[in-house]
Image: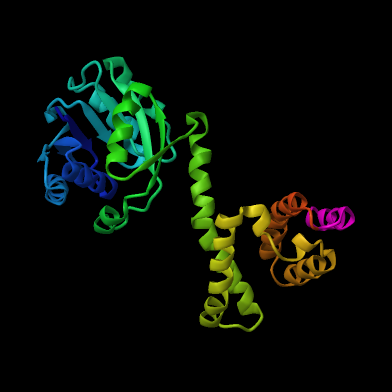
């Protein structure tokens, strides 16, 4: 028999997962609890299954509970679930937060529940699009192995690719996604502003950047970061880096600091690459750490 799933906090992520699970017959979708009955009704309509409940005390029993509220409310809602009288020994309670570990659900352990967390590394801003593109999404998992033995195949059934995350460093794992996604966007914005200082308008800068950026990204995933590295630090060209730093510092110290900090990471890659001489690497180290 299919396990029954209740959802507390059915926003874009939960709606997407529940729709896919219902379509594939993975779970029987049970109760949907949102802050308002209107939004819960909208979620049920989107999923094509489930029923609206008005409060946590009205939840019917389920085998699996997904708490998909904003991170700041997960602990509170888990405590409310644990004290509602709904949970039974052997039930599974999980969340999909990328920043919080499954231990945030410890209130449910006192009722005999098993805890887990599975975080899909994906944007769910548009649930319709997320449904059609979920296949191939990497999903970071951690928690009770018995719980994961149920949840892992549920995510895999809708195209998820699961991998293990160290729960003690969950916040660092989440920060990694911010760095490679959000901060990459921010870094490109800094690049546009730097081009602008050289008299190049934004539209032209974007056109200049596109082949450089896409080519670099392609090389990183084809060759790895070390072999994909090019430029003055890879060559050991300390003179060019010195002039870059001087010009940037005279214009904008914050941009100069970004150049310097990322230059230190680049220097490590250059050392691994092995194309620059030891003397040039030492000169670069002095420049970048000044």
Identify which residue, 275 or 115, lies in the foreground: 275
Identify which residue, 6 or 233, lies in the foreground: 233
**In the rendered structure, does residue 172 fall within the stretch colored magenta?**
no
Q: Main secondary structure of the magenta part?
A: helix
**In the rendered structure, does residue 278 fall within the stretch colored magenta?**
yes
Q: Position of residue 117 (x, y in %)?
A: 37, 33
Q: Quadrant of residue 87?
A: top left
Q: Quadrant of residue 234?
A: bottom right
Q: Quadrant of residue 56?
A: top left
- Judged from this view, the residue extending furthest toward the front is 222
Q: Is the residue 27 above or below the residue 277 in the image?
A: above
Residue 68 visible within the image: no
Instruction: Tell me what residue is drawn at x 23 percent, y 29 percent.
Output: 64
Residue 137 visible within the image: yes
Q: Position of residue 221 (x, y in %)?
A: 55, 55
Q: Is the residue 132 above or below the residue 33 in the image?
A: below
Q: What span is colored magenta in the figure?
A: 276-290
196 on left or right of 4: right
Instruction: Tell me what residue is drawn at x 25 percent, y 27 percent.
Output: 80
109 on left or right of 121: left
Q: Position of residue 183 (x, y in %)?
A: 54, 57
Q: Considering the image in quadrants, where does the C terminus appear?
A: bottom right
Instruction: Tell me what residue is drawn at x 71 percent, y 55 percent.
Output: 266
Q: Is the residue 7 above or below the residue 200 in the image?
A: above
Q: Considering the image in quadrants, where does the N terminus appear?
A: top left
């Amino acid at each position: 028999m299919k396990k029954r799933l209740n959802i507390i906090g059915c926003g874009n992520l939960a709606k997407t997962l529940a729709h896919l699970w219902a379509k594939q017959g993975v779970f029987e979708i049970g109760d949907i609890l949102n802050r308002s009955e209107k939004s819960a009704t909208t979620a049920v309509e989107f999923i094509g299954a489930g029923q609206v409940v008005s409060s946590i005390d009205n939840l019917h029993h389920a085998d699996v509970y997904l708490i998909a509220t904003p991170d700041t409310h997960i602990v509170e809602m888990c405590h409310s679930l644990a004290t509602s009288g709904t949970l039974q020994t052997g039930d599974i309670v999980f969340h999909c937060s990328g920043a919080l570990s499954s231990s945030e659900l410890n209130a449910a352990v006192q009722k005999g529940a098993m805890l887990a967390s599975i975080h899909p590394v994906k944007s769910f801003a548009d649930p319709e699009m997320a449904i059609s593109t979920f296949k191939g999404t990497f999903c970071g998992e951690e928690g009770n192995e018995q719980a994961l033995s149920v949840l892992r195949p549920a995510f895999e059934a809708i195209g998820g690719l699961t991998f293990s995350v160290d729960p003690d460093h969950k916040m660092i794992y989440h920060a990694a996604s911010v760095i490679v996604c959000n901060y990459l966007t921010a870094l490109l914005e800094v690049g546009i502003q730097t081009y602008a200082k050289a008299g190049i308008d934004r539209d032209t800068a974007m056109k200049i950047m596109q082949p450089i950026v896409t080519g670099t990204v392609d090389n990183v995933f084809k060759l790895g970061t070390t072999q994909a590295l090019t430029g003055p630090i890879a060559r050991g060209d300390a003179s060019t880096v010195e002039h870059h730093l001087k010009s940037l510092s005279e214009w904008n110290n914050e941009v100069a600091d970004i150049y310097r900090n990322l230059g230190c990471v680049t220097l490590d890659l250059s050392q691994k690459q092995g194309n620059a001489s030891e003397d040039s690497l030492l000169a670069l180290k002095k420049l970048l750490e000044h």
